[in-house]
Amino acid sequence: MLMKNETVQKPHDRMAAYLAKDMQAVNDLIRDRMASEHAPRIPEVTAHLVEAGGKRLRPMLTLAAAHLCGYDGPYHIHLAATVEFIHTATLLHDDVVDESAQRRGRPTANLLWDNKSSVLVGDYLFARSFQLMTETGNMQVLAILSNASATIAEGEVLQLTAAQNLATDEAIYLKVVRGKTAALFSAATQVGGVIAGTSEAAVKALYDYGDALGIAFQIVDDLLDYQGDTSATGKNVGDDFRERKLTLPVIKAVAKADAEERAFWTRTIEKGRQQDGDLEHALTLLKKHGTLEETRQDAIDWAKRAKSALDALPDHEVRDMLRDLADYVVARIN
């Protein structure tokens, strides 16, 4: 027999239930703005990804931050939709760059249509996101989200050069993660506070929370690539290895490698000469040096930073949800 709140026991689900009315408004606005009178492929491609059942975590963070800061106007809906459009645009572009075939357990848009459609529809969504953010009439919001868009692109370009270079260390990895993932998390929470007109200290706390949460989120994703459940993640175990991505577990293993192990990483990651059994050997090396557990601990430490940032914000049930959400992000690896 189900307990009364069993269906909303996860922090993400509790937040979704709390913000249900606003999220419905966000979804309605997204459907309205992804329409195109002259290019029907735009809503086709966009709907495939937007309606694929993602958690909508980033727009929910914007709504949550606005609620936490006492906002009662209409523009948090615009900003949440903006954040989701930016996120969706980057996913469309990422799948082309990575030559991905699967996203959220479904075929990617570039596989179902083609690379040209994915890139151009991604561009359209970026343009729509800027239209939405300008409608708020808030220059600070525009500055935050436009800067985040540039940072995301910069992080992706940095990853192109860093991902297959064994000289990439943890500091460079952190720059990549802050760019491609954490920048949108921190912008999502920050603009929620800005549109509410809250104090600079509260806006800074919201930024710090989003930044740390985004870093923890990406570290967990990178860890799950080596020890996750395909049915839960929508990805195959070892995709990052096969795509020659130098993520944190491997960076840590390379730093501890002897000459023979380094030669293995050079062949498989830098030169891309992979053969049967290489993934299994990579996993053996990660376990030998304890880098999976070290990576897990790093994710937990970033989640703790996220929770600490919330101490500067008002006592509110949403703050409790955000704190629980930080724990939930890293609970995926337990």
Image (cartoon, helix red, strand yellow):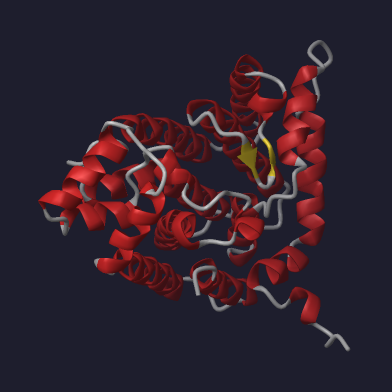
Is residue 330 placed above or below 120 in the rendered structure? below
Q: Quadrant of the N terminus?
A: bottom right
Q: Is residue 68 left or right of residue 293?
A: right
Tell me if 261 is positioned left or right of 122 in this view.
left
Residue 127 location in percent, x, y?
61, 23
| Rendered location of residue 280, percent (x, y) | 40, 55
Left or right relative to 161: residue 303: right
Q: Position of residue 303 (x, y in %)?
A: 42, 69
Specify the farthest residue to the front. 276
**Relative to residue 56, is residue 131 depicted above or below?**
above
At 11% from the left and 50% from the top, the residue drawn is 259
Residue 249, compared with residue 127, is above or below; it is below
The answer to which image quadrant residue 124 occupies is top right
Q: Residue at x 63, y 39 (%)?
A: 102
Nearest the viewer among 301 and 193 is 301
Q: Determine the residue located farthest toward the right in the rendered image.
A: 1
Q: Residue at x 51, y 74 (%)?
A: 327
Q: Is residue 206 visible?
A: no
Q: Residue 265: give x, y in percent of width and height.
A: 25, 45
Determine the residue located farthest toward the top in the rendered image.
38
The number of discs equals 0
Taking the image as shown, residue 205 lies to the left or right of residue 85, namely left
Residue 130 visible? yes
Q: Nearer the viewer, residue 250 or 193?
A: 250
